[in-house]
Image (cartoon, rainbow, N blue to C red):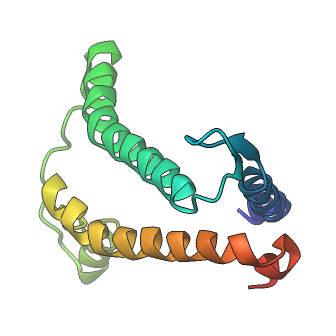
Amino acid sequence: MMRASVGLIPTMLLSGAANTVLTKVLFSVWTTGVDGQPQQFRRPWAPVITMFLGMTVAGLLGMVLPPLLRRLQHRFSCGALPQAEEHREPQTLQQVEEMTSSVEPRPHQFPYYKKVLLISVPAAFDMLATGLLMTGLLYIPARIFQIL
């Protein structure tokens, strides 16, 4: 686990810096406006819309892929299910402790719509914060933005 974290740290630093620089480059692009005059691309909500589309695709994949993968796993499994061990009553306290220590509690499963509702509030605040940060990036240098 530690090796994976060590590899992820530089990746996150580089991708965060690349994201900031590329967004700043996007905001410095000049184009021809509707009136024929050159104008700078200053639309801070464009990256937010892109982020929203990415979250939507991830949400759809999160909804579609797990049942599909379960179906494929069931289809391509050998078909031989492990036989259930015959139930034996524990005779000693040690056997009871061994039986109960190996049983992991099953996590509570929420329906998909409840998961979506629970995550929608933080996601909305994340999008609002990204929009405000992109607006700030219009007015300050990228190096100062990275400090924030």
Q: Is residue 118 visible?
A: yes
* Left or right of residue 21, residue 69 in this image: left
Residue sitting nearer the eye, 104 or 36: 36
* Left or right of residue 26, residue 128 in this image: left
Q: 52 above or below 123?
A: above
Q: 84 above or below 77?
A: below
Q: Position of residue 57 (x, y in %)?
A: 40, 40
Q: Position of residue 58 (x, y in %)?
A: 41, 44
Residue 93 appears in which quarter of the rendering? bottom left
Q: Position of residue 136 (x, y in %)?
A: 65, 78
* Left or right of residue 48, residue 7 in this image: right
Residue sitting nearer the eye, 68 or 89: 68
Q: Is residue 111 visible?
A: no
The number of numbered discs placed on residues in the rendered structure image is 0
* Left or right of residue 106, residue 58 in this image: right
Quarter of the image containing the C terminus?
A: bottom right
Residue name at image x 23 percent, y 75 percent = 96
Residue 109 appears in which quarter of the rendering? bottom left
Residue 92 appears in which quarter of the rendering? bottom left
Quarter of the image containing the N terminus?
A: bottom right
Residue name at image x 31 percent, y 79 percent = 94
Q: Position of residue 22 (x, y in %)?
A: 78, 52
Residue name at image x 50 percent, y 58 percent = 48
Residue sitting nearer the eye, 92 or 71: 71
Q: 126 above or below 1?
A: below
